[in-house]
Image: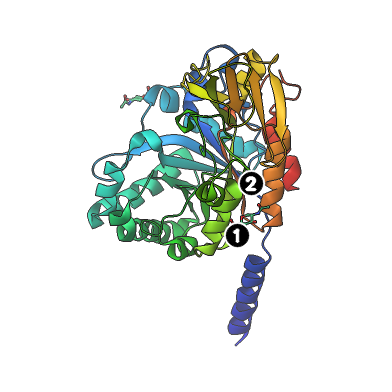
Amino acid sequence: MLTKVLIVIAATAASIQTASGATDKILCYYASWGANRPGDGKFTPEDIDANLCTHVNYAFLGLNDDGSLLILDNATDIVNEGLKKVSALKKINPNLKAIFSLGGYAAGTAIFTAVSADATKRATMAQSAIEFCQTYDFDGIDVDWEYPLEGDRENYITLLTELKEAFEPHGYVLTVAVAAIPTDAAYDVPAMSNVLDVINVMTYDFHGSWSGYTAQNSPLYASPLDGEWQRDNLNANSSITHWILSGADPQKLAIGIAFYGHAFTLTDASQHDLGAPSSGPAPAGDFTDNMGTLGYNELCEFHKDGTIAWDDVQKVPYMYDDTLWVGFDNPESVGLKAQYAKDNNLAGVMIWSIETDDLHALCGTKNALLQAVHDNMK
Ligand SMILES: *[C@@H]1O[C@H](CO)[C@@H](O)[C@H](O)[C@H]1NC(C)=O
Ligand SMILES: *[C@@H]1O[C@H](CO)[C@@H](O)[C@H](O)[C@H]1NC(C)=O
């Protein structure tokens, strides 16, 4: 009887906690290759402020054909002890969770489709993930499958459910990264919401050089320039609203925040407003080496003379400097996204990715973006 009463009380306490749960998660993706960038672009695990994140998602590991986890960069992850240094951050913040992020956009979909479709491979993946967590003192995995298609729908949920069941005795965390727009064809959102600890919604890459005109990477709200479909789909608010209407518990959702911008080449330097014609992506940055995007650190290092305008409708800034135009995020806009997470009772925020923050305080404050996220979550 006593046991029963205690169970009832425990269950009640748990459900109350879910209903009025805190917005307190800051899931920090760390791109491990940041440790190998030149000059001020170098950002090692020791540069992570362990007290500003609740989770560090180490990007990326892969999967072998049999479903077991695969170290992709032995030099960075093992020889230079990237994994060990990330788990060591838990000595600074004992509540911090270290997570292996598996996949990523470059990994493609074939391996996930194959592993999720095969019971033996799914079991191998679960067992291997547990062994990796034990070996490297990590606390769970993040499945970054970009993206499951209609034919993967059932297998995707089966994989996640079996992983979670295997993790349960160990208390390991299971998260996923998902497309901003939930397509019912691929995502069984209510089932995902049930089984996952956090759904990281990639509310960025809404516009880029492919758009043909200047527009924001990660607008919080729609632009007056948007057509109807764009208004309802291409901003963080519409995305989070979609996920909730599709059946996600808000307390499982993390709104994505980008520490980089999409960078355009203006057709004419004198036309630099939103919607200005663009001839294509801007050249790659010296640190991130990726045509059409620039890290916040690169804006601070190389474009301090750029003119910054605040887009008060979409709640994000943009910058122009001669024929360069960048829609990005600054401390103010990331703070507003953290505030949005609180206002909507979300789990918290997810960041891609913390190693392009302003580590060297060239725009003013060390790691100003992560600091602003943290300060606005309190
Ligand atoms: C990775 O590095 C470790 C440490 O130097 C070494 O023992 C191991 O053989 C390497 N593994 C691969 C696959 O290169
Ligand atoms: C947020 O998105 C929802 C759904 O698209 C919309 O109804 C609402 O007006 C949006 N909020 C703002 C402030 O734009």
Circle number at residue 221 = 2
Q: Which residue corresponds to the image point at 61% horizontal and 54% vertical from the top-left?
A: 347
Residue 49 x %, y %: 66, 32
**Marks 1 and 2, Cα distance to the nearest angstrom?**
21 Å
| Tag 1 secondary structure | helix
Tell me: is circle 2 under 8 Å from ligand 2.
yes
**Marker count (numbered):** 2
Residue 223 x %, y %: 62, 42
Q: Which residue corresponds to the image point at 65% horizontal and 78% vertical from the top-left?
A: 9
The answer to whether residue 229 of the structure is visible from this angle is: yes
Pick the front one: 211 or 334: 211
Amino acid tagged 2? Tyr
Pick the front one: 366 or 70: 366
Dot 2 alpha-carbon crowd within 10 angstroms: few under 14, some 14 to 19, many 20 or more: many
| Tag 2 secondary structure | loop
Residue matched to label 1: 251
Residue 91 x %, y %: 63, 37
**Mark in front: 1 vs 2:** 2
Q: Of the two numbered discs 1 and 2 on the same chain, state the one appearing first in sequence.
A: 2
Residue 76 x %, y %: 44, 24
Amino acid tagged 1? Gln
Q: Which residue corresponds to the image point at 70% horizontal and 13% vertical from the top-left?
A: 305
Dot 1 alpha-carbon crowd within 10 angstroms: few under 14, some 14 to 19, many 20 or more: many
